[in-house]
Amino acid sequence: MKENIRKEPAPISDADQQEIAAFIERIWSEDGLAERTLDAYKQDLETLARWLATRGRQLRTAQREDLSAFHGSQPVAVRSMARRQSAFRRYYASLARNEPGFDDPTLLIERPKMPRSLPKALAEREVEGLLHAPDVSATLGLRDRAMLELMYASGLRVSELVELPLAALNMRQGVLRVTGKGGKDRLVPVGEVAMEYIQTYLAQARPALAKGRQPAALFLSKRGEGMTRQMFWTLVKRYAVAVGINAKRISPHVLRHSFATHLLNHGADLRALQMLLGHSALSTTQIYTLVAKEGLKRLHAQHHPRG
């Protein structure tokens, strides 16, 4: 009987380790990428370096044929393949930019075709149920209601919502100054209902959560600190399940997606929606027109006698 011997992965050379570390440090300082993205890029480059070592190559000496063979030998999901290619393209483009004459081996490699998935939006009645789920007689419930109302009223990203400083809120004008992706600021209207709940939260709940301190964050945890994405995601899921919304239909951005879809359903201009969402390209915003059309199709099929 043959003994199964697990083959150890090829070691990464010191030169490749230094290359990867320098690249990660460079894109962190230049682009300010999130830590999870940097970690993913680091792992992808380490995987490639180990594979190249079996062919007697290092990262900077890889050829186009090597990368094509690597992708062919690594059966992964399309999204993982796209992320790997993104890491490799960034790495080799960085070398080509800083070293005249360097031949980028990723230039002619075909990009994987990503499946187009539509953002998940709730029906308006479902959003109403979700907004009414928190117990506003309780300190945390009032905070949660204010957060839910604001996210739906303004279409904020989850990260933008939890990172909002108190100073970003202009109560007199009813607007927020939001810092979005790439450090770009935009002014976002809050809306009367959301503003009323925020005012009540500031008067009744936030002082109790702050415990005599003066934290910068607008929305505070029960420890008196700023909220996190995970905290907000957990509470949204809990409230959704409580009002009968299928947990599989809930995502951290569900209220942002619903905000965009419902505005389009009620006749909002696509360019205005682009500004409200903080999208740099109109093509990113246009996907919500497909969501709105899908909703109209379902409505027709459900209610038309010949649907």
Image: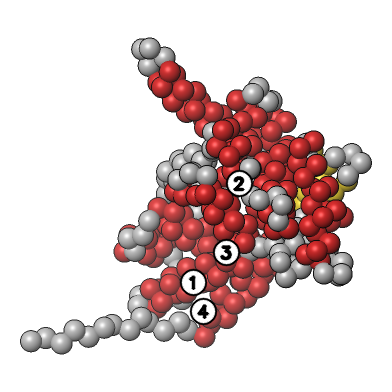
Residue 233: horizontal and vertical position, in percent?
58, 56
Q: Nearer the viewer, residue 249 or 88?
A: 249
Provide the residue designation for mark 3.
37
Q: Which of 240 and 103 is in front in this view?
A: 240
The amino acid sitting under disc 3 is Thr
Residue 10 quadrant: bottom left
Q: How is the rendered protein coloured?
A: secondary structure
The amino acid sitting under disc 1 is Gln
Q: Residue at x 66, y 63 (%)?
A: 228
Camera-side mark, 2 or 1: 2
Dot 2 surroundings within 10 Å: few (below 14), some, or many (20 or more)?
many
- Badge 2 marks a residue whose secondary structure is loop
The amino acid sitting under disc 2 is Ala
Provide the residue designation for mark 1.
43
Q: How far is mark 2 from mark 4, CA to CA?
A: 53 Å
Camera-side mark, 4 or 1: 1
- Badge 1 marks a residue whose secondary structure is helix
* In the image, residue 305 above or below residue 217: above
Q: Earlier in the sequence, mark 4 or mark 1?
A: 4
Q: Earlier in the sequence, mark 2 or mark 1?
A: 1
Q: Which of marks 4 and 3 is nearer the N terminus?
A: 4
Circles 2, 1 touching at the beta carbon (< 8 Å): no
The amino acid sitting under disc 4 is Asp
Left or right? Give the position of 43 relative to 21. left
Q: How far is mark 3 from mark 1, CA to CA?
A: 10 Å
Provide the residue designation for mark 4.
16
